Amino acid sequence: MLIVQKFGGTSVGDVERIQNVANRVSASVEEGHQVVVVVSAMGGETNKLVAYAESFTPNPVKEEMDMLLSSGERVTASLLSIALNAMGHKATSMSGRRAGIVTDAVHTKARIESIDAKAMKDALGEGSIVIVAGFQGVNSQGKVTTLGRGGSDLSAVAVAGALNADLCEIYTDVDGIYTTDPRIEPKAKKMNKISYDEMLELASLGAKVLQNRSVELAKKLNVNLVTRSSFSYAEGTLITKEENIMEQPLVSGIALDKKQSRISLEGVMDRPGIASDIFSALAEKDVNIDMIIQTSGHDGSTSMDFTVSGDELTDAKKVIDGFVANNEVQKASYDENICKVSIVGVGMKSHTGVAAKAFCTMANENINILMISTSEIKVSMVIEEKYAELAVRALHGAYELDK
Ligand code: ADP
Ligand code: ASP
Ligand code: MG
């Protein structure tokens, strides 16, 4: 089999752990598999580099952030190769550039456009273990780009797709996908399987165990994706097509996103095209908008509330300030002390009362819901951040996910 194995930050957190990864990769090779490894930076390293940059300015030049942050993954890729070579294996490490990963030019959250897998295939053909530095690529001008936080998951899935690998294993510090973050609810249960769509919702709604774009790509390319622990041999969780899962629970999991901020606009000029103007301007700055609420207008003005991811708040503020300066918006306020809790499950499609139970659970805990949004397979609620963990545990119990 050709297997892509991705090891996250905790799994390569120090030299002993890199040796542990080398041993596991070595075991797969001895079993007769061809292995391509994708690595993250050592745990905490990316945050450390971000903090260095932010000691100069809260808004470091994004191109330089990519040069800086991509270095973390190159360190672990080369160290792992050194370890494997020292064990007598043939191994070669590759930066995103050498691995042929070409992205668009959106620095710090670039999208992969294509992969020229020749160098990886040649190295595999020569009997080498290939080790790819995750989280990075180059744009068409040859500048280094990174793929957004958690982006090594995306590198692994994209490489698995480009090489037509039989399996893509994501090794992390938990032994699979749980009904909710086990750090918040110790009663959370590991799932043996989960559908791409549910995993995509959980990841998009804050379960950082997998980067959401990696799940989206895995679904598109039909990559066999497994999440498991690098510290045990327990079987992981298979992320697969919905039809491969026999019994669908009503609700599969609860996600929490603490990195959300709410932007409230008051006195928004109530004219055709105003929403388009505001949200187009935000899109142009690559700000992703999540929930939007517009109340019914009166006296020629209306109000709008929406949420953005915390790291995009600075960019969003700049755009909104422009509308305030033009008098198209009277007042803008920003609230970072909110969070979003969501329940996810494909079973919701065919059952009623799922959302009502979520609202009732919040009411019983005396938690005020600030915003609500729903889709076919999820219900999300924005609440005050101080109730985050309480809400997750209450919902986990209410849907009997601990049973
Ligand atoms: P890595 O560094 O290996 O990429 P991450 O820290 O990105 O690992 O993701 C693993 C973490 O995701 C776990 O330690 C866990 O706390 C968190 N997590 C959040 N939601 C879930 C979930 N539903 N199932 C499992 N882990 C989850
Ligand atoms: N090192 C990067 C991060 O911390 C990418 C990754 O680990 O997936 O976001
Ligand atoms: Mg991760």
Image (cartoon, helix red, strand yellow):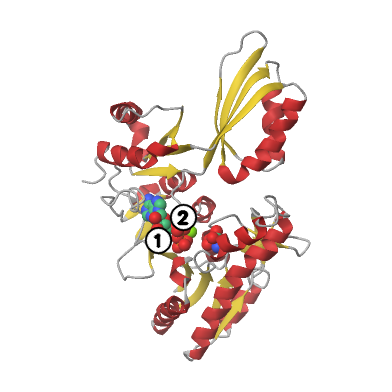
Cα gap from disc 1 to disc 2, whole angstroms = 8 Å
Q: Does residue 141 lie above or below 22 as drawn?
A: above
Label 2 lies in ligand 3 vicinity (Cβ under 8 Å): yes
Q: Which mark is residue 210?
A: 2
Amino acid type, label 1 = Thr
Q: Does residue 156 lie above or below 197 as drawn?
A: below
Q: Where's residue 276, x and y in %? A: 69, 27
Q: Secondary structure at mark 2?
A: loop
Q: Where's residue 161, x and y in %? A: 54, 62
Q: Which residue is at 29% across, 42% downward?
A: 249
Instruction: Give 40 or 120, whichever is nearer the viewer.
Output: 40
Q: Is residue 177 left or right of residue 155?
A: left
Q: Is residue 240 visible?
A: no
Q: Where's residue 386, x and y in %? A: 41, 38
Instruction: Give 152 or 43, whichever is nearer the viewer.
Output: 43
Q: Which mark is residue 227?
A: 1
Q: Which residue is at 72% across, 60% downward?
A: 64
Please report contact status of discs 1 and 2: CB closer than 8 Å, yes or no.
yes
| Label 1 Cα neighbours within 10 Å, binned few <14 / some 14-19 / many ≥20 | many
| Label 2 Cα neighbours within 10 Å, binned few <14 / some 14-19 / many ≥20 | many
Q: Does residue 352 lie above or below 100 as drawn?
A: above
Q: Is residue 315 visible?
A: yes
The quadrant in which residue 393 appears is top left
Label 1 lies in ligand 1 vicinity (Cβ under 8 Å): yes
Q: Which residue is at 62% across, 79% downward?
A: 122
